[in-house]
Image (cartoon, rainbow, N blue to C red):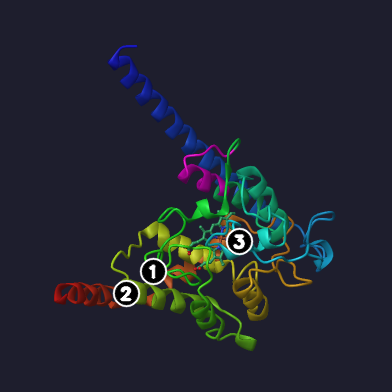
Amino acid sequence: MGQTLVVLKRLSSGLASGVAGVFKTVGLFFVDFALFLFNLLTPDRKKGAVIPKGCPGYGGKWPEYVPPQAGDSRCSCPALNALANHGILPHNGRDISFKDLNTVVRQSYNFSPTFCKFVPSYAANMLSRDYNTDFFDLADLDAHNCIEHDASLCRLDVHEEPDQGKIAHELVERLLTRGTGPNGNLTKKDLSRLLGERRVEAKRANPKYSQAFIHKMFGSSNSSTLLTIFGGQIDDIRTILTEERIPDGWEPRIRHRMGLTILEFNNTVLPVELGVKEEVDGSINVAGRERYDAVQKK
Ligand code: HEM
């Protein structure tokens, strides 16, 4: 095949897959909107009946929790690690299909089918794997600056702790004691404050610190699951973050029939992200300047 033909074929297939990707994403958001309306128009599931019959966790009965053993694969996501610790995902955290991830997250945490398709597809894409046919180990999700990023609330930065499956207990303790809602439960303002603090401290301490806009959005999205799926309830959050275990009798706080849609989720994510005052009051720049001065002095 001539070189020109190779170039033309690559350009046209790149263009075709780009256009198909845009259509798929737009289509998914339309479906998400329809599910959002469906949720508005239909009554929520009754308390105690969020997890579908026959699925693990139905009636609050979660399969036995077994902490990770040597050689098991774990990642920076406490919610996925918990699924593996209960054997809902393979306990060794390996060879998970993206499609199974979709199903299991939907059944266990009551996110909408759109969210459960969107995030695993994004993960497959970032790993250059095929959503329909490929597999991953949990630790694969820790590819730095794909979804995993600096200044998380439950993990040290990868520069300091390369094993992102390791719980950063000091950070988690901080999060657990900062709730200002009733019983110390977490609120949107608490999360904005915690995220801002973490971004400043990570920028000051980590010579490799980076945080693109998309990673800020991942940071606020991941942590917003604590307010939505876990309802900000500090006792449940303690169990999930310190042991990566699903509390006995627990069920998702979102009881909509079609789960938590992307649209509704953003009603929490956006205020959390937009409420991070450190992004506008200059503290992040000061932290950057301090790091620069410290490096200069060396
Ligand atoms: C659908 C598939 C999912 C994928 C691929 C995924 C992936 C990730 C990754 C890579 C991180 C680390 C981000 C960081 O560096 O801070 C993360 C964090 C997190 N995820 Fe997930 N996740 C998924 C589903 C969920 C679900 C369903 C929940 C809650 C029910 C959840 C809750 C969290 C929480 C609380 C964090 C910690 C945030 C922090 O430390 O700041 N995730 N997730």
Image position of 187 (left or right of 284):
right
Label 1: few (<14), some (14–19) or many (≥20) C-alpha neighbours in 10 Å = few
Q: Which SS class for mark 3?
A: loop
Q: Quadrant of ligand 1?
A: bottom right
Residue 255 locus on image (x, y percent): 73, 64
**In x, y percent, where is residue 50?**
77, 62
Q: Is residue 101 visible?
A: yes
The magenta segment is: 120-131
Give above or below for 251 relative to 214: below
Q: Earlier in the sequence, mark 3 or mark 2?
A: 3
Res. 160 mark: 1
The reply to whether dot 2 and dot 1 touch (C-beta < 8 Å) is yes
Q: Callout 1: helix, strand or loop?
A: loop
- Read off the residue under disc 3: 70
Residue 278 is labelled as: none
Instruction: Give the spatial CA distance, label 2 vs label 1.
Output: 10 Å
Instruction: Identify residue type, mark 2.
Output: Ala
The 10 Å Cα crowd at callout 2, few under 14, some 14 to 19, many 20 or more, is some
| Amino acid type at image mark 1 | Glu
